[in-house]
Amino acid sequence: MPYRAPVADMIATLKHAAGLEQALADGLYGDLGLDDITAILEEAGKFAGERIAPLNRVGDREGAHFHDGQVTMPHGWKEVYSDWTAAGWNGLMAEEALGGQGLPCVINSACLEMWNAASGAFGLGPLLTQGAIEALQAHAAPELKAKYLPKMITGEWTGTMNLTEPQAGSDLSALRSRAERAGDGTYRITGQKIFITYGEHDLTENIVHLVLARLPDAPPGTKGISLFLVPKFLVNDDGSLGARNDVRCASIEHKLGVHASPTCTMVYGDEGGAIGWLVGEENRGLMAMFTMMNNARLAVALQGVSIAERATQKALAFAAERRQGKAPGWEAEGMSPIIEHPDVKRMLATMRASTLASRAICYMLAAEIDRAHLGRTPEERKAGHARASLLTPIAKAYSTDIGNEVASLGVQVHGGMGFVEETGAAQHMRDARIYAIYEGTNGIQAIDLVTRKIGIEGGALVAAEIARMRGIVADVAKSNAVEFGLTAARLRETVDALETATKHLLGALANDPADAQAGATPYTRLFGLALGGTALAQKALKMRANGVSDLARAEATGLARFFAENIATAATGLAETVVTGGHAVVDLDIPLAS
Amino acid sequence: MPYRAPVADMIATLKHAAGLEQALADGLYGDLGLDDITAILEEAGKFAGERIAPLNRVGDREGAHFHDGQVTMPHGWKEVYSDWTAAGWNGLMAEEALGGQGLPCVINSACLEMWNAASGAFGLGPLLTQGAIEALQAHAAPELKAKYLPKMITGEWTGTMNLTEPQAGSDLSALRSRAERAGDGTYRITGQKIFITYGEHDLTENIVHLVLARLPDAPPGTKGISLFLVPKFLVNDDGSLGARNDVRCASIEHKLGVHASPTCTMVYGDEGGAIGWLVGEENRGLMAMFTMMNNARLAVALQGVSIAERATQKALAFAAERRQGKAPGWEAEGMSPIIEHPDVKRMLATMRASTLASRAICYMLAAEIDRAHLGRTPEERKAGHARASLLTPIAKAYSTDIGNEVASLGVQVHGGMGFVEETGAAQHMRDARIYAIYEGTNGIQAIDLVTRKIGIEGGALVAAEIARMRGIVADVAKSNAVEFGLTAARLRETVDALETATKHLLGALANDPADAQAGATPYTRLFGLALGGTALAQKALKMRANGVSDLARAEATGLARFFAENIATAATGLAETVVTGGHAVVDLDIPLAS
């Protein structure tokens, strides 16, 4: 099953749900026009579908090969990666002064979705490299930037994020890797890091590791962590490669999915210490890393969207071909395509509507990140930053949950064939599973949303978001279009539920933090339903107003209605869970055995 | 992570949620007492935990081996299977006259859960053999029974169900395999069957295939299908094995999970026709097969429970050991065990409460199957049969959905480790995925529930079930126990929602069947929540009354409350979806590409 980049829906989502036209009118993107954006996405879609997508299967079957410290990528990967970087895709969003294209986050996000839809294991490498580029752009000294960034931006070198250690996963305060000052301005790094994505591979001649470690005199906990740049090969002043640094890959993991993405255990300083350079200030490394992690959270959210899109395309194609039984009202000869059976159609509609809703949330976040950087006034940039902070955990948790659910539905639509690996549906489900875990588990995202985000501006930020959504609900009601069915009523219930749950949590945060945390996951889902449901409705309204084709309009309206009447209906129960269910969690004493 | 059979909860569930004490008091089980049952379950639990559980991992890694038509089971499997049959576990429920133990379905069900929790791939073989035994007991001619059943009951020979063909999966009317009358009372079978579980293996010296095929003069569709017994080796009159029959395994599937269970493509009649014997009447084969499939549906439902139990045990053990961060209120030194974090605790509580709820539904169904067979009056047997018919699709769909959801949560609880295959959590998720698909996909179960079951007795059967649940809700309310929190209120809403949705569907069935089918899946979930929620509450009430240990009582009450306040809260939204969401599905026109 080939991958066809959904450029039309991407553009429609950017325009009608993520405020692209407003941002263009506001001059945020300079000379860039809608035609340029469409042309870029079409070109990216072509590369993703024609070149990357065929790697996905071989990557899964072969996996990355580990032998004696070396990692060899699967057959065909190196060539495609090389062509991909040569075409300039790696540096889309990077600074122009350093060789990047300086394009906005909305474009990069749509492209990230495509690379990852074509192959999640392929998309992961550049995802990490972009994160490393952002951290260096924001925090590294000029000479470090000049030496490393140009080749990272072209993609000639890749980047990694080295956070996790066996005892320090979600909680980095337990981190033990050490850094000693060498006296010449460099540092010597020792320690072991696990789960390092693309920590070693043969796609490029050098790899630039960003590593968290502690100085000998660092305070304990997260305030004593520094960030270091540790190249695989040292780089001479003329830019040529020098000696091998004291860092090696000890093993790679045997994983459920994304087999072609090497997940490495990295050992630093076996022979006395890897040479590293400080990024940012001593003991402020976590701050620098968070710059990178926040954008990586959007990128992982997009991986959720991407796998949902890919799984949906595959299931739709199968359901249109596969014939079994007779659907109600089926008058033709023989068996119906299974897509005609209402229960199968429900699965497909759930897949498609959820995919589009999560895409809308992610693109909304991308647009807000652009506003945070490109806004015309400090107030606008500040507002963009605040809203991006709020949307980030929701985008990450909701979209990656959707990625998992949709990929699992994709298996179900295929019936017994879905369980057979050759069909490919199972790979999507396996690949999707990590997205809800890495870059902060979805539980961590939910806790971030509840404990750090909804309280921003004393709750005014969420209140504004709720008011914005109420505006959309009112517009749907005003449209009086019969095709919307109960969309307005259901979305009103959804937003009401979000408001009720928010009020409860803001109260609980002050006097009952365990109760607030117990409600974090259902609350995050509820927020996703409200954002996604209203985004789909807004998109449908604008498509109706803008006279697009009858079919696209009908689909947009039908999916918005489906989402409101069949998916967002979970909202009231989720609010009930948040408001009155927390103590049942906190008070419960669970024995460890039956 | 070893498997520890949850015998205490199994017994508590049988007693307090599945009416075991009443059945014993009614004399349904003859001399059998509660002590006997406990002793049998403890013995089974020992075998499952000590002998079968260690096979699970090697089975996953090695898988079944296929070479030149032969299937070799993974290392160690043959010996354990042989010891398992020697201990008499295969024939628990089979007729005593033929060498079985004639024990009730409730005991066999608890045991099935254990074999499958220990290893789903191991449990599958006996599951199919038991189904074949039941079909033969009910439909085969006496001489066929005498020849085949004794060795199938001991487990010396295994049985298979050959239904699926490439074009005939959920819809068996499209079946093409042929049977010709040979003139001597036997038949010659030709055709290809796919997805045949344990179609070939080296555990036993013979395999008894039950095969659906069409006679030359059969009417088209499902009314022209006959059932045949086709042994791998012909059996001489003295019981010794004769010639190899004309049936072979052409290949086995490379699957997402249950790797050790060989899923075979079987070819019949390559050399002129496999010799088969008719089971039941010509053209009535589907009826006979349904006997077997109905009980197999309970067995697969139990597989859902089993994988949920296993995944929960593993996640609980991990969460008690793994330390990260500080939970709210954590006063001790260092990091908290992650089980203390409210969001992780929510996951674990969801896993445990859902597992116990699905167990209760399955055991309730098993008890009803016993009543259908052992009831003292024709009325009682008829009532048992009717209620079992109603519960079957709910048990199958709800429990296997829970199996998938709980196994996926198990991966999430493990964080990054969950994605690494060596951890074992991922295997549970992979194995679980087939349960929602085979023995009738969960969509088929939902449609069965809506189109064939809720209308039984003009809706009176469901109405009685709802009245029964209302009685439990009233008892919880009457108990006035503060530990139940809002359990009564929430379960009342749940049962109200079920009643509302049922009324809508009964109406829609008559005049809008597509709308009814569109609501089938959310309705089935809703029914599961109501059954499961009230069952946990009933169990907790009875445990409180019966003076069991404080801890067990507190846990039962706490989990019933958690389920009511945090899981069953989905009910109202599901009813809304069923009642007003169907047309959004039916009217939706989904384009095949974005």
Image (cartoon, coloured by chain):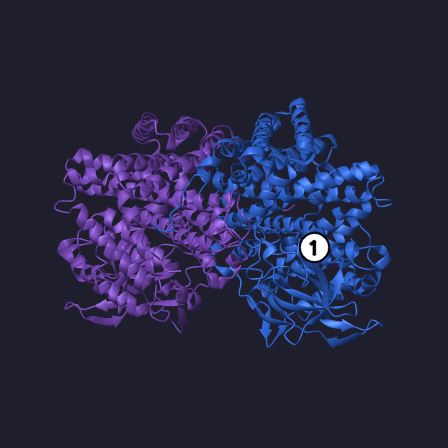
Chain colours: A blue, B purple
**Considering the numbered disc 1 on the image, is that residue within a helix, a strand or a loop?**
helix
Residue A117 is left or right of residue B179, and the answer is right
Q: Quadrant of residue A466?
A: top right
Tag 1, which chain? A
Report the amino acid beneath label 1.
Answer: Met
Q: Is residue A544 left or right of residue A499?
A: right
* Image position, residue B140 (x, y; %): 21, 53
Residue B353, relative to residue B508: is it above or below? below
User: Which residue is nearer to you in this view: B126 or A260?
Assistant: A260
Density class for disc 1 (Cα within 10 Å; few <14, some 14-19, many ≥20) is many
Residue A13 visible, this orientation: no
Judge whether B244 appears above or below A383 on screen: below
Residue A424, horizontal then vertical, whole percent: 54, 58
Q: Toward the viewer: A157 or B542?
A: B542
Q: In the rendered view, does A430 fall on the left or right side of B388?
A: right
View extreme (front): residue: A217
Q: Nearer the viewer, residue A544 or B564?
A: B564
Left or right: A59, with B528 as reference point: right
Q: Quadrant of the C terminus of chain B?
A: top right
Can you say which quadrant of the picture contains the N terminus of chain B?
bottom left
| Residue under pointer 1 | A289
Locate residue A11, reporting x and y percent. 73, 43
Quarter where residue B513 is shown = top left
State the count of labels.
Answer: 1
Question: What residue is drawn where x is 60% and y is 68%?
Answer: A64
Q: Is residue B448 visible?
A: yes
Residue B16 image position (x, y, % from top left): 27, 39
